[in-house]
Image: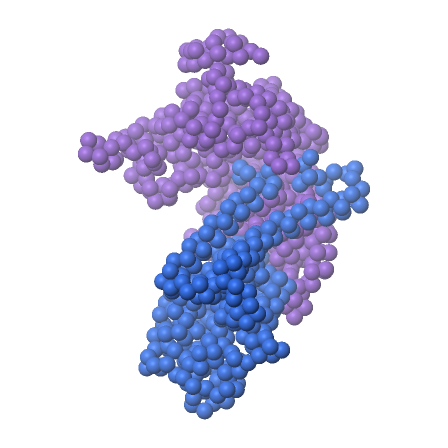
Chain colours: A blue, B purple
């Protein structure tokens, strides 16, 4: 009866035990993925709705369009996923996008080569992220406060540096990053795809990923287990900054312009993608694939609502409601996930 | 059934009850509770008399908690009847059960730290004056009255966060009494109390009894049960094994009922001749935590550290393990002077620390058994930062088998394991990091008797292999039963070092209290 405790029974043979273990594992895996599955169903539901409402929606060119439009948010959301898994938050990503973009554009217009300018843009983002991480780890600031400060500092620096004016007009070579295609797939989409593969590997196969989960799950226990929690957290925020810098490169190439007021509200889009993807804001759990689906749900909503000619004011109302709804559903699923075992109910 | 007589008794609940089934105020009959895949309670019968302390005993997972959850209305039984004061009752919710006079004191206290005792006691039921403002004076007076009935005096105008756990517990009891509780459920109330605080609690419980309040008392500590209990009901695997009058039973009998096997010896210490000195601590100081602590530890030895809560025991362990910095003093590991500035440094010197609180410091509950086991040794299963899952699983699987960790599979989240098995996972973590100096802080707190013995046996196996152990514990029998030497801490200093021969409960207490 009590299959959860049966592994101690001496009579069952090894084979039985193995079979039973496999059965239990597959049940567990199914449970763990059921939420993922829920998000995927959400994605398809949104697609079907728009397909019914607009025949153009499912055309190849529109789908490519969606992927391309989603790519920037999806790139930032990778960093945000790592941050949120460590039980943190990064509100400064949008401002970092603006600052990185401005530095990049200024260097490009100053006649520097593209690799130099791009590396500089990425570096600016990384440094901002590392500052966030250091303030949080070593300065012991709450992530919300540290990154709220950085949000304002980076935005202000971008405005100051550019005198509040956009920097526009770049070579076609640079713009290839956004406009180019390889095998008729837009470069930003390829970039995004590669990034998610790398992020998946880092999160699931490396020490860094494991430690991120451990810190989010129980920072004290992680520290007592000899994990350098401060360093790991600093690195994670640094990565989030780096990816914001990468998003800035793609954005600047796509718009053929860098604007000091770019990236406003990007932090909320990224957080929304992560949360819709089923990552818990409490930390310690979450999946990178969920974030990609979450980013696509956001992207499809924007695209579909545009196709239907719904005003941007109304769009905000709808998107906000969808975020709330998604999290409500997620919490409901979480609730009946809890009593998986009858034990530990009354601690 | 004898419901007829029950109804009669119900007619005069407060009046002096007739002879036989005198003053049975609660009867739970054939209670069943099924969870998906688990039968948690199987036809459980339980009765509670007025003014008695009825102990519920059983290993973790035996069904005590489920029974209590049903009694408090948090869960509903899938079968059986509850007769409360003789009336068949359906307890629909915690609020409902509270209204009917059932109060619960949980292991984790549920007070709001920033509010005063009076504000906590009357939270949600504040009495107001004619203008609708809260009548603080009245609330305070009532709270002081209830507390003094319990033999407790404390300042009801201070926020409760300034009080110790024992006093906070009294405030919880006062809250239950202010709700006119006739039945008080106490779930391991002494797990965080020192010996003198336990006595204070017992005094209060005796006063409650005298007032006719019935107490359902859950505890793993057998010695307490004999001190405070009137009757005991033992549960095992969701069934009642039996109910006994405390004076008519013995410790051995209760253990046998709980685990269905004779535990030849509760403390099966097998001493090994101590080897080389592996750890030496000289004049260690940390302001406000401990002063001038010196001791040595040899391979194969268990050094017990005893002392009241707040005597600096845990702080000492944390400092040796590099969690908190020391102000002065030196630490020698394997004869070499070492500066241990972080847990990582301690782990590299092959130290392991099993913390007092497994859930908040020892485990990452949302990670799997495997991931918890390899948390501090992941380096040895990784190359270039990539984890070798195959090696990792092999390692974890080995420890699950060696330590007989009861888990359906390696990917089970640590939160679903019982206390004893969680402790084994933490132990496996340190074994995996190749520790040979272990600090066990309250190694068996909240662990049932059967698992306790298993943990002790593991400690024996470790010392037989030359591992050295520092064991901090509040349980004197454990200290006496397992240690080769005992250090007694008092007021942040070492009060005595006792050999196994000299240490008795009395001597240790004498040094710990400074009497």
Where residue A60 sits: x, y (%)? 57, 70
Is residue A106 visible to the viewer in this orientation of the structure?
yes
User: Dividing the image into 4 quarters, which one contains the N terminus of chain B?
Assistant: top right
Residue B37 falls in image quadrant? top right
Q: Residue at x 36, y 62 (%)?
A: A313
Where residue B464 sits: x, y (%)? 72, 48
Please determine whether, in this image, residue A178 is positioned above or below residue B315. below
- Residue found farthest to the top: B19
- Residue found farthest to the left: B131
Describe residue B451's horizontal placement relative to residue A318 as left or right: right
Q: Residue at x 53, y 60 (%)?
A: A51
Please determine whether, in this image, residue B269 is positioned above or below residue B222. below
How many numbered marks does the figure carry? 0
Describe residue B95's horizontal placement relative to residue B250 as left or right: left
Where residue A222 sits: x, y (%)? 55, 57
Is residue A88 visible to the viewer in this orientation of the structure?
no
Taking depth in this image into account, of B365 and A336 the one nearest to the observer is: A336
Q: Residue at x 65, y 66 (%)?
A: B386
Where residue B402 sits: x, y (%)? 73, 48
Residue B181 falls in image quadrant? top left
- Residue found farthest to the front: A55
Q: Residue at x 69, y 58 (%)?
A: B392
- Residue found farthest to the bottom: A111
């Amino acid at each position: 009866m009590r299959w959860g405790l049966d592994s101690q029974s001496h009579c069952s043979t090894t084979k039985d035990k193995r079979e039973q273990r496999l059965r239990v594992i597959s049940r567990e895996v199914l449970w763990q993925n059921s939420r993922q599955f829920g998000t995927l169903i959400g994605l398809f539901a949104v697609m079907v709705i728009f397909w019914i409402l607009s025949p153009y929606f499912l055309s190849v060119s529109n789908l490519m369009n969606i992927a391309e439009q989603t790519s920037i948010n999806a790139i930032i959301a990778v960093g945000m996923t790592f941050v949120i898994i460590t039980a943190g938050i990064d509100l400064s990503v949008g401002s970092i996008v603006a600052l990185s973009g401005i530095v990049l554009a200024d260097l490009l217009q100053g006649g520097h080569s593209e690799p130099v300018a791009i590396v500089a843009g990425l570096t600016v983002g990384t440094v901002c992220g590392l500052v966030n991480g250091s303030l949080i780890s070593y300065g012991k600031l709450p992530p919300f406060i540290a990154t709220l400060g950085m949000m304002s500092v980076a935005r202000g620096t971008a405005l100051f540096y550019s005198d509040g004016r956009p920097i526009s007009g770049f070579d076609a070579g640079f713009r290839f990053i956004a406009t180019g295609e390889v095998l008729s797939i837009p470069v930003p989409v390829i970039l995004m795809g590669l990034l998610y593969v790398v992020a998946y590997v880092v999160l699931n196969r490396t020490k860094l990923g494991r430690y991120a989960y451990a810190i989010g799950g129980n920072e004290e226990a992680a520290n007592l287990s000899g994990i350098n929690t401060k360093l790991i957290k600093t690195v994670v925020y640094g990565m989030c900054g780096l990816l914001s810098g990468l998003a800035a490169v793609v954005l600047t190439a796509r718009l053929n312009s860098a604007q000091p007021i770019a990236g406003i509200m990007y932090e909320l889009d990224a957080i929304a993608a992560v949360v819709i993807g089923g990552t818990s804001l409490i930390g310690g759990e979450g999946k990178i694939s969920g974030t990609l689906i979450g980013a696509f749900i956001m992207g499809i909503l924007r695209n579909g609502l545009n196709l239907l000619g719904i005003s941007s004011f109304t769009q905000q109302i709808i998107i906000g409601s969808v975020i709330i709804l998604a999290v409500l559903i997620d919490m409901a699923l979480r609730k009946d996930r809890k009593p998986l075992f009858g034990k530990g109910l009354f601690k | 059934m004898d419901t007829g007589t029950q109804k009669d008794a119900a007619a005069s609940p407060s009046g002096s009850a007739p002879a036989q089934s005198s003053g049975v105020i609660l009867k739970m009959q054939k209670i069943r509770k099924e969870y998906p895949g688990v039968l948690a309670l199987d036809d459980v019968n339980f009765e509670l008399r007025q003014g008695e302390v009825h102990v519920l005993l059983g290993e973790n997972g035996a069904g005590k908690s489920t029974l209590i959850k049903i009694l408090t209305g948090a869960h509903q039984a899938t079968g059986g009847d509850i007769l409360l004061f003789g009336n068949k009752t359906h307890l629909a919710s915690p609020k409902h059960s509270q209204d009917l006079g059932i109060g619960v004191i949980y292991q984790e206290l549920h007070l709001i730290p920033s509010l005063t005792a009076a504000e906590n006691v009357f939270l949600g039921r504040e009495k107001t004056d004619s203008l609708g403002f809260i009548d603080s004076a009245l609330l305070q007076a009532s709270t002081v009255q209830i507390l003094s009935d319990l033999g407790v005096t404390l300042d009801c105008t201070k926020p409760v966060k300034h009080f110790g756990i024992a006093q906070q517990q009294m405030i919880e009891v006062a809250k239950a009494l202010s709700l006119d509780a006739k039945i008080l459920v106490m779930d391991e109330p002494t797990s965080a109390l020192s010996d003198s605080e336990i006595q204070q609690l017992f005094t209060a419980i005796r006063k409650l009894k005298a007032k006719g309040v019935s107490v359902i008392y859950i505890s793993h500590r057998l010695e307490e049960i004999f001190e405070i209990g009137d009757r005991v009901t033992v549960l095992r695997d969701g069934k009642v094994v039996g109910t006994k009058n405390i004076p008519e039973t013995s410790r051995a009998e209760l253990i046998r009922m709980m685990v269905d096997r004779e535990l030849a010896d509760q403390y099966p210490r097998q001493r090994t001749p101590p080897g080389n000195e592996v750890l030496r601590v000289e004049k260690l100081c940390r302001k406000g935590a401990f002063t001038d602590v010196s001791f040595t530890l040899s391979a194969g030895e268990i050094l017990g550290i005893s002392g009241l809560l707040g005597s600096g025991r845990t702080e000492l362990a944390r400092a040796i393990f590099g969690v908190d910095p020391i102000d002065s003093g030196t630490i020698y590991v394997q004869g070499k002077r070492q500066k241990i500035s972080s847990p990582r440094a301690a782990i590299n010197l092959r130290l392991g620390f099993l913390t007092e609180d497994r859930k908040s410091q020892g485990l990452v509950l949302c990670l799997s058994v495997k991931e918890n086991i390899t948390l501090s040794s992941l380096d040895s299963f990784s190359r270039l930062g990539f984890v070798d899952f195959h090696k990792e699983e092999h390692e974890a699987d080995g420890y699950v088998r060696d330590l007989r960790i009861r888990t359906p599979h390696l990917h089970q989240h640590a939160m679903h394991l019982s206390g004893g098995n969680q402790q084994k996972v933490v132990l496996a973590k340190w074994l995996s990091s190749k520790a040979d100096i272990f600090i066990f802080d309250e190694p068996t707190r909240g662990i049932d008797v059967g698992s306790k013995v298993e943990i002790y046996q593991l400690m024996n196996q470790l010392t037989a292999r030359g591992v050295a152990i520092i064991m901090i514990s509040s349980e004197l029998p454990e200290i006496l039963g397992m240690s080769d030497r005992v250090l007694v801490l008092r007021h942040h200093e070492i009060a005595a070092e006792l050999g196994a021969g000299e240490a008795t409960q009395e001597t240790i207490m004498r040094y710990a209290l400074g009497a």
